[in-house]
């Protein structure tokens, strides 16, 4: 995650304002994002820092009086908060900041692209499509055909709709019987290593084929072709793309891979990560706890 954060969000930025407070606070926000603390701790600290300093500028009067340099830093701070929290209010602040940048003639493709990808992460596809139409974002990831119904509730996820070459939203029943929800991603080699190992172990494969949901976390990229390939080649269980974090409240970490073993909707055990030596013993222990693997 450290490399990702540094590449997405510039660090040690200097402000053009007289006191330099905005740049100091932005750099501190980035230091939190780059911390090697637990991801949930980082998210809480990012929220706290943003709300205690940057939030007071998010109103028309304060925005209009910011210097252009400080406005840019405020936008970047909103982008950081939106990226890590996937909370709609920070995306709304991004939009406010971009609108002011646009009125000053300072908005560029990268601002609109960040906003577009934030809409994607929150499944705000209409807003994303409108942004592309208005600003001709040539390098934006194309949105696949998406079938969404407001009537679908609960733990929602997209499945690959092979007939329409798109994504179809459905409700996932995790409340009956045993389910193994694996937070995973086709670009995560640890996830692929875990999947390959399970596929190679006949007994593990049997359990995972019947009970597993390989759940791709919501992010700023849909990576449709990768998810489709992951779904086609990944035989053990169902492959789905999570609609939003709030739909999967039992998931306490979206780090990949993380295995959640559920029985009748309750988390019985969690297995985190797939180290070089694998995590087979932990999987068997978790399977026993949910009653799938005989003790002998």
Image (tube, rainbow, N blue to C red):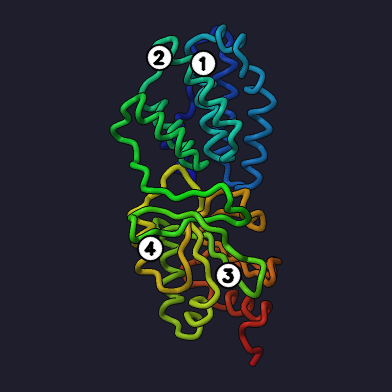
Residue tagged 3: 180
Q: Between residue 270 and residue 97, name the one nearer to us.
A: 97
Quadrant of the rendered image containing residue 35 = top right
Residue 180 position in % (x across, y down): 58, 70
Residue tagged 1: 71
In the image, farthest residue toward the left: 138
1 displayed left or right of 154: left
Q: Secondary structure at mark 1?
A: helix
Q: CA distance from mark 1 to mark 4?
A: 41 Å
Mark 4 and mark 1 in contact (Cβ < 8 Å)?
A: no
Quadrant of the rendered image containing residue 249 = bottom right
Could you tell which of marks 2 and 1 lies nearer the N-terminus?
Answer: 1
Q: Is residue 238 above or below residue 254?
A: below
Could you tell which of marks 3 and 4 lies nearer the N-terminus?
Answer: 3
Q: Secondary structure at mark 2?
A: loop
Q: What residue is at 63 percent from the left and 48 percent from the top?
A: 246
Residue tagged 2: 106
Q: Residues within 10 Å of mark 2 (few under 14, many from 20)?
A: some
Q: Residues within 10 Å of mark 1 (few under 14, many from 20)?
A: many
Residue tagged 4: 230
Q: Residues within 10 Å of mark 3 (few under 14, many from 20)?
A: many
Q: CA distance from mark 3 to mark 4?
A: 17 Å
Could you tell which of marks 1 and 4 lies nearer the N-terminus?
Answer: 1
Could you tell which of marks 1 and 3 lies nearer the N-terminus?
Answer: 1
């Amino acid at each position: 995650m450290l490399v990702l954060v540094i590449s997405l969000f510039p660090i040690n930025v200097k402000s053009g304002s007289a006191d330099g407070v905005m740049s100091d606070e932005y750099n501190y926000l980035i230091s939190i994002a780059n911390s090697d603390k637990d991801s949930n701790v980082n998210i809480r600290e990012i929220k706290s820092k943003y709300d205690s300093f940057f939030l007071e500028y998010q109103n028309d009067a304060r925005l209009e009086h910011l210097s252009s340099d400080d406005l840019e830093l405020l936008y970047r701070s909103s982008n950081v908060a939106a990226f890590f929290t996937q909370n709609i209010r920070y995306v709304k602040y991004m939009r406010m900041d971009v609108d002011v940048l646009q009125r000053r003639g300072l908005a560029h493709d990268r601002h609109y692209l960040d906003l577009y990808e934030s809409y994607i992460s929150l499944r705000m596809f209409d807003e994303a499509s409108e942004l592309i139409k208005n600003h001709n974002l040539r390098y934006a990831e194309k949105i696949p055909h998406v079938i969404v119904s407001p009537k679908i509730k609960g733990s929602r996820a997209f499945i690959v709709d092979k007939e329409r070459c798109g994504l179809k939203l459905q409700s996932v029943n995790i409340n009956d019987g045993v389910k193994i929800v694996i937070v995973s991603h086709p670009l995560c080699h640890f996830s692929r290593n875990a999947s390959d190992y399970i596929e190679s172990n006949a007994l593990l494969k049997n359990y995972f084929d019947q009970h597993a949901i390989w759940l791709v976390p919501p992010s700023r990229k849909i990576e449709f072709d990768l998810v489709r390939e992951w779904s086609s080649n990944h035989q053990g269980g169902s492959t789905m793309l999570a609609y939003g974090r709030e739909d999967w409240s039992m998931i306490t970490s979206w780090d990949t891979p993380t295995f959640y073993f559920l029985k009748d909707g309750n988390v019985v055990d969690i297995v985190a990560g797939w180290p070089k030596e694998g995590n087979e013993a932990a999987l068997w222990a978790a399977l026993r706890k949910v009653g799938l693997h005989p003790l002998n």
